[in-house]
Image (spheres, rainbow, N blue to C red):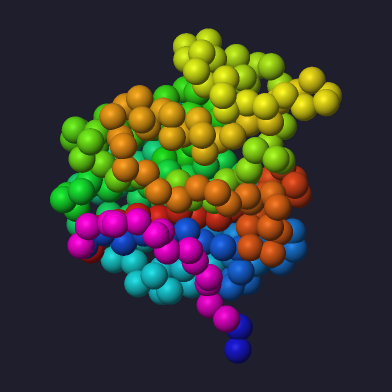
Amino acid sequence: MTAGPEVIEPDWPAPPGVRAAFTLRTGGVSEPPYDSLNCAAHVGDAPGAVAENRVRLSACLELPNPPAWLEQVHGAVAITLEDETAAAVADAAVARERGRVCVVQVADCLPVLLALRDGSGVGAAHAGWRGLAGGVLESAVRALGAPPDQLLAWLGPAIGPEHFEVGDEVRAAFTRTDPGAAAAFTVNARGRWHCDLYALARRRLRALGVTSFYGGGWCTYANPRRFFSYRRDGRCGRMAALIWRT
């Protein structure tokens, strides 16, 4: 019998009634190069396989409703989930209502999950370098409408700095408005930069007033058995980071 979906459960002091998970690439039905738990419908995988993977994920996590799958564009728009937002073009979603499942899809970009300390609101942000530089975390925190010091943040698996080589334009996108962000970039022998997404996200959260953050330290590129990585493989599936109120 095929094993079900594998997930990482965030190690953070989430309040009662808040649940979260991050999917690994195993436990689904997709064929290579999307093997096997691809959650994305936009990467060229068979639609039936994606649908089955999503059914398996919902059953595994006992989700109260289908996740609100976003059309992600590496931007900074955050939406508040209401009745009909599953097809929204956005890179972050927040929810105050119980049973609304926020989700973002990643395969190297950084997923950031947010929860209010009293459990009254949750959110998920898709934070690659473009989203981080464009203000997606700021948008998500603003959409939650609470004092930032009342927020907890969890940084899920993303590409690590050892494998995330970028050009001058990426470094400039951050240092133009925040010279201190230069500390998240290390030059290599080719005159390019290794970029630490985790450090950049923590810096952004800290500047917002969010002081309680957890997670970080994975590298999607370095662990092909567990994680999809677009930079490593090109054609590949996507993992999902989900959070909801029960």
Q: Can you say whether 10 is above or below 129 in the image?
A: below
Residue stretch in magenta: 3-16
Horizontal relation, residue 152 to residue 189: left or right: left
Can you say which quadrant of the picture contains the C terminus? Answer: bottom left
The residue positioned 79% from the left and 20% from the top of the image is 191
Q: Residue furthest top?
A: 176
Please tell me which residue lies in front, 134 or 201. Answer: 201
What is the chief secondary structure element of the magenta stretch? loop
Total count of labels: 0
The residue positioned 41% from the left and 74% from the top of the image is 59
Horizontal relation, residue 27 to residue 203: left or right: right
Asked whether the viewer can see residue 89, the reply is no
Asked whether the viewer can see residue 114, the reply is yes
Please tell me which residue lies in front, 159 or 209. Answer: 209
Can you say which quadrant of the picture contains the N terminus? Answer: bottom right
Q: Which x, y percent locates residue 49?
A: 60, 66
Q: Can you say whether 129 is above or below 80 in the image?
A: above
The residue positioned 52% from the left and 42% from the top of the image is 110
Q: Which x, y percent locates residue 27?
A: 58, 73
The answer to if 13 sits in the magenta stretch is yes
Q: Residue furthest bottom?
A: 1
Q: Residue furthest right?
A: 190
The residue positioned 35% from the left and 56% from the top of the image is 12
Q: Can you say whether 199 is above or below 29 in the image?
A: above
Q: Which x, y percent locates residue 70?
A: 44, 44
The answer to if 193 sits in the magenta stretch is no
Q: Which x, y percent locates residue 105?
A: 51, 49
